[in-house]
Amino acid sequence: MITLGSSVCLPGFKPKYNHAQQVQYVNKQASKSNSINMGSSTHYYDTFNPYAKPGKIAPGATILLFETLITQTADDITCFYPQLAQTLHIKKQTLSMTLNPLARFSDQTKVTTADVVHSYHLAKQHPLYVEALKDLSLHIESNRLVWHYSNLTATLLALAKMPIIKHSEALIGSGPYFVNKASSTQIQYQKNDLFWAENLWLNIGRNNFKHVNFHLNVKPFQNLNALSQGKIDWFLEHNAHRWDQIITSANIQKTTLAQPLSEYTLYLRINPQLDYKTRQFIAHSINFDKINQALCHGFYTAKKYQAPTPLEAITRHKPIKLLTQGAQWTPAAQAICHQLEASNIPCIHALKHPIAYQQAVKTGAYDLIIEPMLITPSMQLSDLFPHYLNETSPQSTEQNAHERLEQLIQSYLCIPMWTNKQFRIVHNKAIHLDHLNHLEHIDWQAMWKTRELTNSISSHDEDSV
């Protein structure tokens, strides 16, 4: 087994894994001879290169074909462990690391610092990575990678997302899979039998499939039908109504997995130009639990507030303008307006297309907005609602994002409506995933399969892209 070099954690957290060992939630005896079939709503792609621009990267390519210098485990997202790196060391706004001498690309050539520098320069010019890397600089010192940063959390998150590719004309990565077949509708990745990190402690019990098949243009409302037809093996269901309507059978099962630290929260943002009493009255005039039960079958956990006693009524003749961007929130918006009107607050709902919505948010042409956000331990101030921080009183640069969010809530500038700390998965019975409970994301590469129930990619559909 390749030994664990070191780890770096977010401030205030300690690593779960201190020595070379397998990740706790995996099954190291898992079968590795089957394939897994997955759906993607992506309707087209034109590259497997994560740094191509313009370019639409193929689903699965970033995590299956490439690796990063550091990574997280699904049960410890507050700490970062070496992947292509071997050792990590922090001192005075500097993160230095050495590369694992065993690290190899899929063509069996060694991963070098020159490859990292090459990848870093490509990433800095790519819209997906440029913002995350803007305050980061790199130089090589005695064959060590030395990163100079201003924000440690942002640096760790950026390096954990930056794929390392070989400095060559051909696109070559170091990941556990390579592209076996590719067409306009399907992609098949095949396990690399020579994958250098097969026995790295992070990978034991993972990458359990000989083939990973992606079927493109499978929309969320088509997932159940695709599963029933054997086209895919599993999917995450985000829609409350669809989840409630799914009936289990001999082959179709529903599994709910807990998410301990992170949560998906739906917020009702209130324009700070509304006075405090109005914001407070609006917050306590809406019964989010009632809306959750009526519209979402109790899919979410509704936030509850203790209203001030007595809650001072307000008089308002101008309608409250409630904006939404996605049509999926229209029923909730209408229910909110109905409850506000029952409290003598006129309300109108406006569904905006993305450009008009962003313009309205930027100019403050709204009173209320329904907006989802993922709350994580590594959340940064920049992750808070776009254009929102500048609308309110200036915050300290030292302020924690969670502290700032709580400040906004206490001021009735954003109201948590519903929260979800569960993953709802629909799958065929051959897929084993109960061991993935209490993780921060679904580590599907740690799933395994007892037998084949679905059809693999057909041999006649191999037209190249």
Image (cartoon, helix red, strand yellow):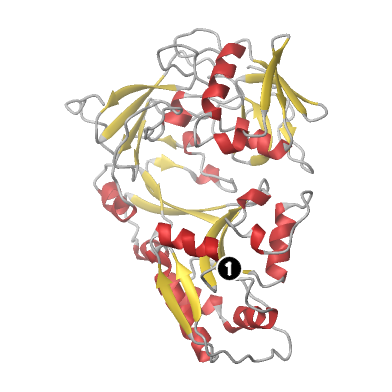
Residue drawn where x is 59% and y is 40% of the image: 74
Seen in the picture, residue 90 relative to 214 is either above or below; the reply is: above
Quarter of the image where the C terminus is located: top left
Numbered label tally = 1
Residue 447 percent across, percent down from the top left = 47, 37
* Residue placed furthest toward the front: 363
Residue 353 is left or right of residue 277, and the answer is left
| Residue toward you, 108 or 278 | 278
- The quarter of the picture where the N terminus appears is top right
Q: Position of residue 345 (x, y in %)?
A: 53, 88
Residue at 71% across, 63% down? 406
Task: Residue 324 in the image: state x and y as whole percent.
Answer: 45, 67
Front in this rendered view, residue 333 or 271:
271
Question: Badge 1 local density, few (<14 within 10 Å), some, or many (20+)?
Answer: many
Please state the horizontal and vertical placement of residue 96, each as a whole percent of the image.
73, 21
Secondary structure at badge 1 equals strand
Q: Residue 390, relative to residue 438: is it above or below?
A: below
Residue 353 showing in the rendered view: yes
Residue 9 in which image quadrant? top right
What residue is shown with label 1? 269
Give the amino acid type for the residue marked by disc 1 in the picture: Arg
Q: Is residue 327 left or right of residue 404?
A: left
Which residue is at the front of the view, 230 or 65? 65
Question: Which residue occupies the extreme right position in the image?
Answer: 92
Q: Residue at x 74, y 59 (%)?
A: 394
Residue 25 seen by the camera:
no
* Side of 243 where 300 appears, left or right: right
Would you place residue 310 above or below residue 329 in this image?
below
